[in-house]
Image: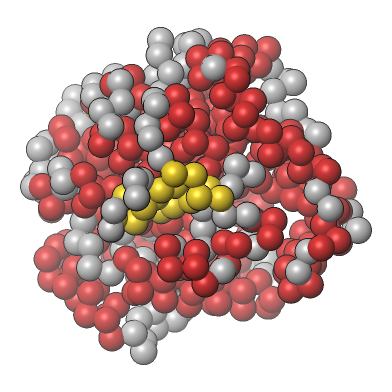
Amino acid sequence: MGLELYLDLISQPSRAVYVFAKKNGIPFELRNVELLKGQHLTKEFFLVNSLQRVPTLKDGDFLLSESVAILIYLSFKYKTADHWYPSDLQARVRIHEYLGWHADRIRGTFGVSLWTQVLAPLIGAQVPEEKVKRNRTNIDKALQHLEDKFLGHKAFLTSQQVVAVGCPLFEGRPRLSAWRERVEAFLGTDLCQEAHGPIFHIVEQAANKTLPDPSPEFYPNMLLRIFRIP
Amino acid sequence: MGMELYLDLLSASCRAVYIFVKKNNIPFDFQFVDLLQGHHHSKEYMEINPLKKLPSLKDGNFILSESVAILLYLCRKYSAPSHWYPPDLHMRARVDEFMAWQHTAIQLPMSKILWIKLLIPMITGEEVPAGKTKEILDEVNKNMQLFEEKFLQDKMFITGDNISLADVVALVEMMQPMAGNHNVFHNSPKLAEWRTRVELTIGSGLFLEAHERLKKLTEWDCSTLDPTVKERVSKLLQKFK
């Protein structure tokens, strides 16, 4: 059994790993773990990853979670081109600097709109308007910092596609729009569309009101996640 | 001017960097940025780090933030012994995995406990509702369990027989609630042993020195706190309600 990647493309870090592996021609078996069906919470998946999270990598007996760790592992093992994770010390630690900031400011912030606009309404849960506004502010602040401080590093961060549902993310930010276009051009339109297929499909289904209801056992987890929105 | 580190040892991320440089005898200038006085918001500091966060490193013209990035930089630049960030692919991946996971699983909730148990009551005079407190403590307990079962298991340290950056980062963060009189180790003898082991490997003297300021936080006279800061903390309290 070769390399296995347990992913759900509606999740940002899963997309990063997927895009990176595909772009670099790394052979792997895709194991789809459907988050909205609660498949990450099953006993079977617990044996793969006791943290019950995607993405997860399985390479023989070696199990690894956390997209950053997976990306670095793949870049070493498959000896990908230097620009992805440069060997130059200063360039390399700049990526870690971005990733540290990203963990605090992007993860957890940009995914919120999927919950507020699609998933919470789906199960009839209310998200206080104050929280929605706070999230918008946090997104704006993060975009500003992204533009001012981090832009220009063509590296892992280019793989971390952010999709904030329902808001024209880079409107009024020409530098970020241009950056995103460069990233998409580099990765290839087909690959980007493929990676974002599932999440755009969900948004479309939500708009057409054809999004299937999650199973009721999954509601408590969803409610907990919604409650955690700052 | 040699390498400068901008630190306040109240912050766990700063303590990780401080302990690492001292343990490895790396020469540096300690630039104190007083979080309690809001100096991280000063014009001078914003020139070093416009994101107003600690720690920051300044090595000649090279300025770097984010403790994990700083630790990796120091490791390589000063050729620290390889056990700190092992060259073996699998062991290194374990360190990377922990460093990524800890942001939301350990650092954030541990910091929240300190705010809930000490800083918010101290500054606003109000307690955070019991329900919310319990929720956060439950989350911390769950994550400590995950840490024990997945990252530490039956090993001496996270990567095996030797201490690495991951152990230092983990421990300094788990010390944060101590200032709020909350001990996250008391549920698990295995974790308590690991804590002692890491402390002894670092050196008790250095460890205590690094945590002195945190220990004294209960004695802080916050009456001199800037009203705008007090306002911000009150807003923070609203989020917990």
Q: Nearer the viewer, residue B183 or B29?
A: B29
Residue B48 at x, y percent in the picture:
42, 63
Residue B195 at x, y percent in the picture:
60, 19
Observer able to see residue A120: yes
Left or right of A206 in this view: A201: left
* Above or below, comparing residue B77 to residue B156 in the picture: below
Residue at 51% across / 58% down in the picture?
A: B53
Q: Nearer the viewer, residue B83 or A120?
A: B83
Residue A166 at x, y percent in the picture:
45, 79
Q: Quadrant of the C terminus of chain A?
A: bottom right
Residue at 57% across / 54% down in the picture?
A: B33
Q: Quadrant of the N terminus of chain A?
A: top left
Q: Nearer the viewer, residue A50 or A208?
A: A50
Observer able to see residue B97: no
Residue at 34% across / 85% down in the picture?
A: A173
Image-quadrant location for residue B42:
bottom right
The coloring applied to the image is: secondary structure
* Above or below, comparing residue A64 to residue A31 in the picture: above
Left or right of B188 in this view: B85: left
Q: Nearer the viewer, residue B19 or A121?
A: B19
Residue at 49% across / 44% down in the picture?
A: B30
Q: How many marks?
A: 0
* Above or below, comparing residue B87 to residue A5 in the picture: above
